[in-house]
């Protein structure tokens, strides 16, 4: 009496089942990896934009700390409120405010210099960069050398909204003969190119300690 032989190997059906399961698992793995990578990239971009916003605020803070009394210089902080209808994001007009600070700083000779520092957004095509422009304190609108405060390679500064506190009320414009009690700056930053949909908004309040 002959014994039945044991079957070795796999049938075609079994191989197809294994390949199908492996394909499903691979698809799930690739999809999960892509999602994790996408989330990581968005988080990294938002951290970069937040860091850029903090750098901008720190630059403004240093200038505000060097703002002298308006009684001493005859010059006060000035601010305009501009809603740019021509420059918009997804049909929403962007705030294009300007902030001008009278500043006392040490010059190259070691003597104090009276300058005016203007913060404003320079727009060039798809690039929106926050600039710090310097000129004489007596000038109505500083138009001297400019320093790019925001990182143009990383993100755009889409909007800058500046408000001024006086008698407990925030005002959009400041033209008074003395300084306001505080300044609130709100920035909206966005990614570049395909990352433009990724945006953050940050605000900071700067008390004015001299009058």
Image: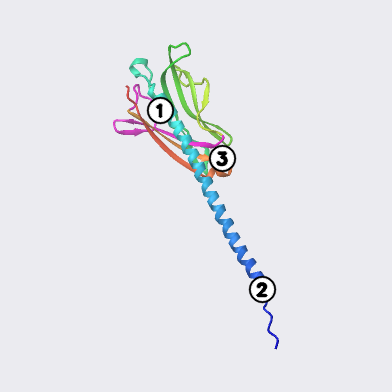
Question: Of all residues shown, which one is farthest toward the left?
Answer: 167
Figure quadrant of residue 171? top left
Is the Cβ of the residue at disc 2 closer than 8 Å to that at disc 3?
A: no
Residue 23 picture location, percent across and down: 62, 63
Which residue of the protein is positioned furthest toward the bottom in this rendering?
A: 1
* Circle 2 SS class: helix
Residue 192 is tagged as 3
200 inside magenta stretch? no
Q: Is residue 95 visible?
A: no
Residue 49: in sight, yes or no? yes
Where residue 154 sits in the image (x, y, percent)? 55, 37
- The numbered dot on residue 211 is none
Q: Earlier in the sequence, mark 2 or mark 1?
A: 2
Q: Secondary structure at mark 1?
A: helix
Dot 2 alpha-carbon crowd within 10 angstroms: few under 14, some 14 to 19, many 20 or more? few
Residue pointed to by mark 2: 13
Query: Mark 3 or mark 2, which is nearer the start of the sequence?
Result: 2
Q: Nearer the viewer, mark 2 or mark 1?
A: 2
Residue displayed at 58% across by 44% down: 194
Q: Position of residue 33 (x, y in %)?
A: 56, 53
- Mark toward the start of the polypeptide (1 vs 3): 1
Q: Is residue 160 above or below residue 62?
A: below
Outermost residue, right direction?
A: 2
What element does badge 3 sit on?
A: loop
Residue 33 horizontal side relative to residue 4, left or right: left
| Other residues around mark 1 within 10 Å, as few (<14) / some (14–19) / many (≥20) | some
Q: Measured from the top left, where is residue 50 in percent x and y?
A: 46, 38
**In 3D space, how far apart are the residues under numbered discs 2 and 3 (Cα atoms)?**
51 Å
Viewer-proximal residue, 125 or 134?
A: 134
Q: Which residue is mark 1?
A: 61
């Amino acid at each position: 009496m002959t014994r039945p032989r044991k079957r070795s190997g796999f049938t075609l059906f079994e191989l197809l089942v294994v390949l199908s399961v492996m394909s499903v698992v691979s698809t799930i793995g690739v999809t999960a990896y892509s999602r994790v990578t996408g989330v990581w990239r968005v988080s990294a971009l938002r951290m970069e934009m937040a860091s850029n916003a903090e750098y901008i605020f720190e630059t403004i803070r240093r200038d505000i700390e060097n703002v002298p009394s308006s009684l001493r210089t005859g010059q006060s902080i000035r601010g305009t409120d501009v809603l740019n209808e021509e420059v918009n994001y997804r049909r929403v007009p962007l705030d294009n405010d300007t902030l001008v600070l009278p500043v006392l700083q040490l010059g190259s000779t070691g003597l104090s210099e009276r300058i005016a520092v203007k913060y404003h957004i320079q727009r060039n095509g798809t690039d929106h960069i926050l600039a710090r422009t310097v000129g004489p304190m007596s000038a109505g609108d500083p138009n001297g050398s400019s320093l790019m405060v925001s990182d143009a390679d990383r993100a755009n500064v889409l909007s800058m909204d500046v408000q001024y506190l006086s008698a407990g009320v925030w005002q959009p414009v400041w033209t008074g003969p003395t300084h306001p009690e505080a300044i609130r700056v709100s920035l909206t930053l966005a990614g570049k190119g395909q990352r433009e949909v990724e945006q953050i908004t940050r605000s900071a309040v700067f008390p004015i300690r001299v009058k």
